[in-house]
Amino acid sequence: MKKFVMAGLAGTVAGIIATTQIAGPLLAQEAENKASVYEQLDLFGDIFERIRAQYVEEVETDELIEAAIDGMLTSLDPHSSYLSPDDAEQMRVQTRGEFGGLGIEVTQEEGFVKVVSPIDDTPAAAAGIEAGDFITHVDGESILGLTLDKAVDLMRGPVGSEIVITVVREGEQEPFDVTIVRDTIKLTAVRARTEGTSVVLRVTTFNDQTYPNLKEGLEEQIEEAGGIENVNGVVLDLRNNPGGLLTQAIKVSDAFLDEGEIVSTRGRNLEDGERFNATPGDLTAGKPIVVLINGGSASASEIVAGALQDHHRAIVVGTKSFGKGSVQTVMPLRGDGAMRLTTSRYYTPSGRSIQALGVSPDIIVEQPRNRPDEEEEEDTDTRTRSEADLRGSLNNDSLSEDEIRQIEEDRAKAEATAELREEDYQLAYAIDILKGLSAFNPTGGPSQ
C-alpha cells in the first residue's frame, strides 16, 4: 500500500514539474504578446498626438478617432465597419422597411463600389441600374479608394435632390452617366400575385415584414384560387434580393419545410456555432416550388435558396448568386454608435459554404438583356392559318360547349405565358417548370 501511495505521489510531483516546464514558456509568450500590443497602442497614441499638433489644418479629435476605428474594421473584410450614431439609426430605420436614398444595395470589390442589386420600384431601378454595375464617380467626383461608408455618404442627400453617378458595366465599352433623383425608399418586402395557376412570391428584401408579408400574400392568393388544390405550385422570386435579417431567412425557409436543418453558423470558436432547424408545417402543403436567383441574390436570399435546394424541396433556376456566406453582428457602442463585425460563416444543410462561390442553379437560365436602341420590328399578323379558317370547314361535333370553353381557356393561359416570356423570360421558364411538374404529379403532393 505504501508503494502505491509513493508511486502516486511521485507521479504527481513529476506532473507538476512537467506542467511548470510547459507553462513557463507559454506565460512568457503571452506576456511578450501583451507588451507588443501595448507598444503598438503607444505608437498609435504618438501618431494621434502628432496629427493633432502638427497637421496643416486643425482637425476634430472625434473624427480622427472614428476614422481610426473605421479603418481598423474595414481592413478586416468588406462587411465589417463602424457605424456613427447617425448611420446606426439609419440602419435601424432601414431594417424596419423605410429610408431615404437611391434604392441600391452596394458592396466594395478591389476598391470599387459594386452594385449587389437595385431594389424594386426605387429611383435606381427606374433609372436602369443593374446588379454587377460598378460606380466610379458621384457627381463627377471619383470614389476610388474611399471606404464603402464614405462612398455611400456621397450618394446620400435630401429627398428630391438630383445625383449623377458614373457607371461601368460589363458589355459596355465606355463608362456612362446615370442621373437619379433621390427619394424616400419604402420597401414592400413581398409582392404576391398569380400567373395562370402558379403563385408568384416576389421577395425584395429580408426585413421585419418579410415573413408576415409572405404568409399573408400566399394565403390571399390561395383563397382567390379557391383552395390550394387549384394551385399548381409556387415561384419564389429572390432575384436582386440583397438579403437582410438572418431570422427572416430562417422563417421563410421554414415556411416550405417540415423538418431538417435550415442553416448553421460557425464562428471562430466551435462553441459559438448555431444550428437552426425547420418546424412542422408547410404553407403550400407540399406543392412544387421553383426558386429564381441571379447575381443580385445575396446573403439571406442564398440561405433560403440553399436550404430548399439541399432538401430537394425546390428547383433553383436562374444564374449563380452573389456568394456572401458570412454573418454580421451589430454591436451597440457607447455614444449611440455601433460596430458591424463579421462573426461567423453560414453553411447550407449539406454543409457547404457559399462564400465567394454562390448558389449554383439546378437549371441555368439567362435573362436576355433589353436592347432599347434596336429598332422594333414591325408588328405584323403572323398567326398561322388553321383548318377552322377554311371556307366551309366541318365543325367539331365531338365536344360539348363546356369542353370547347375549357380548351379555349387553356389556350388563353398558354398565350399569356408566351407574352410573359417576352417581358420576363426567367419567370416564364419557372412557370413552365411548374406546369410540367403538375402534369406528371396532378395531386400536387411531394413526388416519390
Image: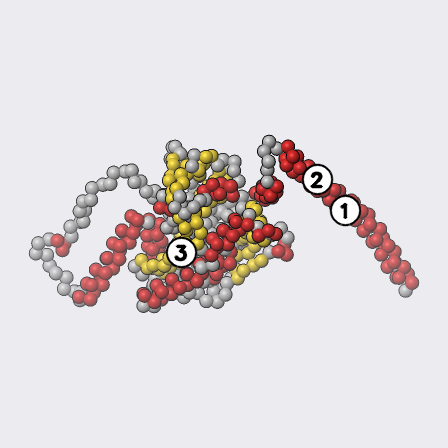
- Residue for point 48% across, 61% down: 251
Q: Farthest residue in the right direction? A: 2
Residue 147 at x, y percent in the picture: 53, 40
User: In the rendering, which numbered label is found on residue 42?
Assistant: 2
Going by the numbered disc 1, the residue's amino acid type is Leu
Instruction: Please report whichever mark, 3 or 2, sits nearer to the chain's N-terminal start.
Output: 2
What number of labels is visible? 3
Residue 54 at x, y percent in the picture: 64, 32
Q: Which of marks 3 and 2 is in front?
A: 2
User: In the rendering, which numbered label is found on residue 26?
Assistant: 1
Residue 236 appears in the rendering: no
Report how far apart the C-alphas of labels 2 and 1 lie in the structure.
Answer: 24 Å
Q: In this view, does 357 lie above or below 275?
A: above
Instruction: Please report whichever mark, 2 or 1, sits nearer to the chain's N-terminal start.
Output: 1
Figure quadrant of the N terminus:
bottom right
Residue 180 appears in the rendering: yes
Going by the numbered disc 3, the residue's amino acid type is Thr
Q: Mark 3 and 2 residues: CB-CB less than 8 Å, in contact? A: no
User: In the rendering, which numbered label is found on residue 353?
Assistant: none
Q: Mark 2 and 1 residues: CB-CB less than 8 Å, in contact? A: no
Going by the numbered disc 2, the residue's amino acid type is Asp
Q: Nearer the viewer, residue 304 or 175?
A: 175
Residue 279 at x, y percent in the picture: 50, 65
Query: SS class of the residue under badge 3?
Result: loop
Residue 87 at x, y percent in the picture: 52, 49
- Residue for point 41% across, 63% down: 215
Please state if 300 lies on the left or on the right of 1 as rendered.
Answer: left
Q: Mark 3 points at which residue?
A: 188
Q: Nearer the viewer, mark 2 or mark 1?
A: 2
Instruction: Please report whichever mark, 3 or 1, sits nearer to the chain's N-terminal start.
Output: 1
Query: SS class of the residue under badge 2?
Result: helix
Q: Which of 331 and 2 is in front in this view?
A: 331
